Image (cartoon, grey):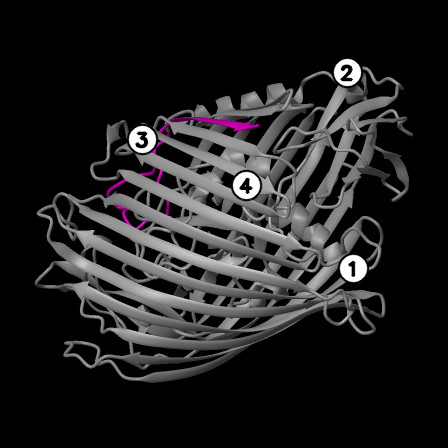
């Protein structure tokens, strides 16, 4: 019945009457979406790339459409994101307010000829970039919860706090998390009970970096680099502030953020404080004990900019306190409490040369301190992880020259001193990692190319200690990855492409040397100090179609690994702790699937958007299924929008997962409905953004296949959410 009610709501929205079209001038105002300041000299470009207007000093524009139905305008201003707006005839009776978003990362801009962007960038922006309004609409208490309904995405979890994004079935160390292009360093990729140390409230936009560009950040080509972005590293024109409040009912949670930017001539200073407090989450109409989550995140940024030089200094202090539920076999009776303390300092000077072969050089000097404590309810420490990490990185960027359109070269070094205590017997280990990378874009014989190479050398030096199952030994690894994408633009609407890649991944410290109970993860983990470098090859075919208000993309992918590293449930129990034993091993495997996304305007004011992703994984030696592969998933949305107001209905659909590894539990399919309302209100120099939503309207009981506790606890029930943002 709930499914039919949701479909009926969709039908009612689809049957809205079309307003009468009129021929009239289109009048509007362009503003800075952060400060509400009118923007002058914004260039308006039509669908034929002709300049049709430049905004006045008050940000006003007036144009006469060449059609009575849909009219495409691009808004372009240096230092701001390009915005494409498809305007219907009905909008012409109103004065439009257009908000341009400042470029969130004040890094060197690469320009390709006279084009605003190339076709690769257009496809990336349309299919794999989550813009500000979309991100705010989906905001959850973790980054993974916020992104889980995007194309290709799923979420692994072990309660509400320790959740991590999964892309096309790839998770853990195969997914790189970035913040403004810099790797986020923590232990979230190593165990399901470890939380990702990034604050979702401070993020404004997310890009899924794919294809050859991944090798700028990681060796693993099939996955994705999830780049979360914010406006920390921009110098505003005037003193400005931001305040955000977020609340949700399912955990009686509330969050807040205050941010101040102070420009002084060619300098700027930014202070940012965010706080989260959520209680035990409600599941099946009752609280799930010990699922609280508290976060305090403090940032300070200083910027200085001269004609050919810019530098930024960023310091972050991050604290997270959260619970892992218990009360079932393999878990503590009252669960486990986890504390994370992290501080990061980063210096990033950039030197500009404005030469075809060397536009700029960017240096990153970074220090990370991470301290992770897992406590039992009697306050004894069950596990403790501490590391200090130092990173040095240099990037050389160039613009268009005789051979290439643009590209980047670079090298870096990582030193990591990793220590473990409590009842975990992984040895103290020193890691040294050195890497080189290169990335290029160019055109040849009517085709667009992206190519990249990356190589890494790593040595692990574990401390000698007595272990029962996995004797540590020194290891040295050298790995190499490469990727090439080829794109052919058949006409203005259709583009077809292919990607070929060779991927590698060096095992992590935990995969090599773990040996002992991990109480918060409900497992006894045994690493494998004889692991080899993960290695495989892959290909992807993709197509992209865009005409007026209709966009469609389709991708199919196939990856063949001759050595794929996974932790597998052995089916055995450790007698002392009554914990299932997980052992790390390398297998031959294939991962393949397809994904598609569609977006179209319906009846002028309505936008329909949908995506579907299906991934399969096979262990070739035994012809059995890879563990932890998400089932077939689809997300549908119908949105009504007019000027600065939008509302809509979302449907999340998942099939059952019965393609399982040995000792893996299956999950049933589900169908849940969400609704949302968004409104942006400019008031003089104040910009107010309001987001209201209800997730899981009908309080459906369902289980996430990638949840470590799915056998005993389903996903959250009905959840009312509110987000209020002030920019002034």
The answer for how far apart the CA atoms under marks 4 and 2 are is 34 Å
Q: Please name which of the two marks, 4 or 3, marks the residue nearer to the observer.
A: 4
Any magenta on residue 378? no
On screen, 10 above or below 492?
Answer: above
Residue 251 tag number: 3
Indicate left or right for 134 with 446 as reference: left
Q: In this view of the protein, which residue sits in the foreground, 456 or 470?
A: 456
Give the mark nearer the N terminus: 2 vs 3.
Answer: 2
Percent from the top left, x then y, of residue 41?
Answer: 81, 36
Residue under label 2: 19
**Label for residue 112?**
1
Displayed quadrant of residue 230: top right
Cβ atoms under marks 3 and 1 closer than 8 Å? no
Q: How far apart are marks 1 and 2 (CA)?
A: 41 Å
Pointer 4 residue: 204
Q: How many labels does the image show?
A: 4
Is 705 covered by the magenta stretch?
Answer: yes
């Amino acid at each position: 019945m709930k499914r039919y009610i949701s479909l009926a709501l969709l039908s009612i929205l689809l049957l809205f009457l079309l307003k009468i079209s009129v021929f009239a001038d289109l009048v509007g105002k362009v503003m800075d979406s952060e400060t509400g300041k009118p923007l002058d000299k914004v260039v308006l470009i039509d669908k034929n790339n002709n300049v049709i207007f430049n905004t006045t000093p008050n940000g006003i524009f007036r144009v006469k459409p060449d059609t009575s139905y849909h009219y495409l305008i691009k808004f372009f201003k240096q230092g701001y994101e390009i915005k494409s707006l498809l305007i219907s005839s009905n909008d012409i009776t109103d004065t439009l307010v257009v908000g341009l978003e400042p470029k969130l990362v004040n890094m060197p801009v690469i320009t390709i000829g006279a084009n605003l962007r190339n076709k690769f960038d257009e496809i990336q922006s349309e299919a794999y970039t989550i813009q500000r309004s979309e991100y705010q609409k989906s905001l959850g208490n973790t980054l993974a919860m916020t992104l889980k309904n995007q194309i290709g995405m799923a979420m692994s979890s072990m309660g509400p706090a320790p959740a991590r994004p999964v892309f096309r079935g790839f998770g853990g160390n195969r997914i790189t998390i970035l913040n403004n292009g810099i790797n986020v360093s923590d232990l979230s990729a190593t165990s399901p009970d470890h939380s990702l140390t990034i604050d979702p409230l401070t993020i404004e936009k997310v890009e899924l970096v794919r294809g050859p560009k991944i090798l700028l950040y990681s060796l693993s080509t099939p996955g994705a680099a999830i780049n979360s972005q914010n406006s920390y590293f921009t110098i505003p024109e005037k003193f400005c502030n931001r305040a955000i409040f977020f609340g949700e009912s399912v955990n009686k949670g509330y969050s807040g953020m205050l941010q101040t930017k102070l420009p002084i001539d060619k300098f700027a200073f930014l202070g940012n404080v965010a706080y989260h407090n959520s209680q035990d989450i409600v599941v099946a109409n009752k609280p799930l004990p010990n699922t609280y989550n508290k976060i305090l995140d403090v940032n300070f940024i200083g910027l200085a900019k001269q004609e050919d030089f810019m530098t930024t200094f960023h310091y972050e202090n991050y604290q997270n306190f959260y619970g892992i539920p218990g009360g079932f076999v393999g878990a503590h009776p009252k669960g486990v409490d986890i504390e994370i303390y992290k501080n990061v300092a980063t210096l990033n000077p950039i030197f500009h040369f404005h030469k075809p072969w060397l536009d700029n050089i960017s240096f990153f000097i970074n220090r990370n301190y991470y301290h992770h404590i897992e406590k039992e309810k009697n306050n004894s420490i069950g596990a403790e992880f501490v590391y200090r990490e130092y990173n040095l990185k240099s990037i050389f960027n160039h613009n268009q020259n005789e051979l290439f359109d643009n590209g980047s070269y670079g090298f870096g070094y990582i030193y990591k001193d990793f220590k473990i205590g409590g009842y975990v017997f992984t040895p103290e280990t020193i890691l040294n990692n050195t890497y080189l990378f290169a990335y290029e874009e160019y055109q040849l014989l009517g085709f667009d190319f992206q190519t990249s190479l990356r190589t890494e050398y790593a040595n692990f030096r574990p401390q000698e200690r007595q272990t029962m199952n996995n004797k540590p030994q020194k290891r040295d690894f050298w790995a190499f990855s490469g990727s090439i994408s080829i794109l052919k633009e058949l006409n203005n609407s259709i583009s077809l492409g292919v990607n070929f890649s060779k991927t590698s991944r060096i095992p992590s410290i935990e995969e090599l040397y773990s040996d002992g109970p991990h109480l918060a993860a409900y497992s006894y983990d045994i690493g494998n100090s004889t692991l080899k470098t993960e290695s495989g090859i892959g290909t992807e075919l993709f197509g992209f179609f865009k005409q007026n208000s209709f966009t469609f993309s389709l991708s199919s992918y196939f990856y063949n690994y001759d050595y794929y590293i996974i932790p597998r449930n052995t089916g055995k129990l450790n007698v002392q702790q009554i914990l299932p034993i997980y052992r790390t091993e390398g297998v031959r495997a294939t991962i393949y699937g397809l994904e598609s996304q569609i977006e179209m305007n319906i009846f002028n004011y309505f936008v329909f958007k949908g995506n579907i992703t299906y991934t399969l994984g096979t262990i070739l030696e035994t012809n059995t299924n890879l563990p932890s592969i998400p089932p077939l998933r689809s997300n549908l949305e119908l949105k009504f929008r007019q000027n600065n107001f939008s509302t809509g209905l979302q449907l999340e659909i998942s099939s059952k997962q019965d393609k399982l590894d040995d000792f893996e539990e299956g999950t049933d399919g589900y169908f849940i409905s969400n609704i949302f309302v968004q409104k942006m209100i400019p008031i003089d120099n104040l910009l107010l953004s309001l987001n209201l939503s209800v997730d899981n309207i009908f309080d459906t009981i369902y289980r996430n296949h990638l949840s470590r506790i799915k056998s005993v606890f389903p996903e959250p029930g009905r959840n009312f959410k509110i987000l209020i943002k002030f920019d002034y």
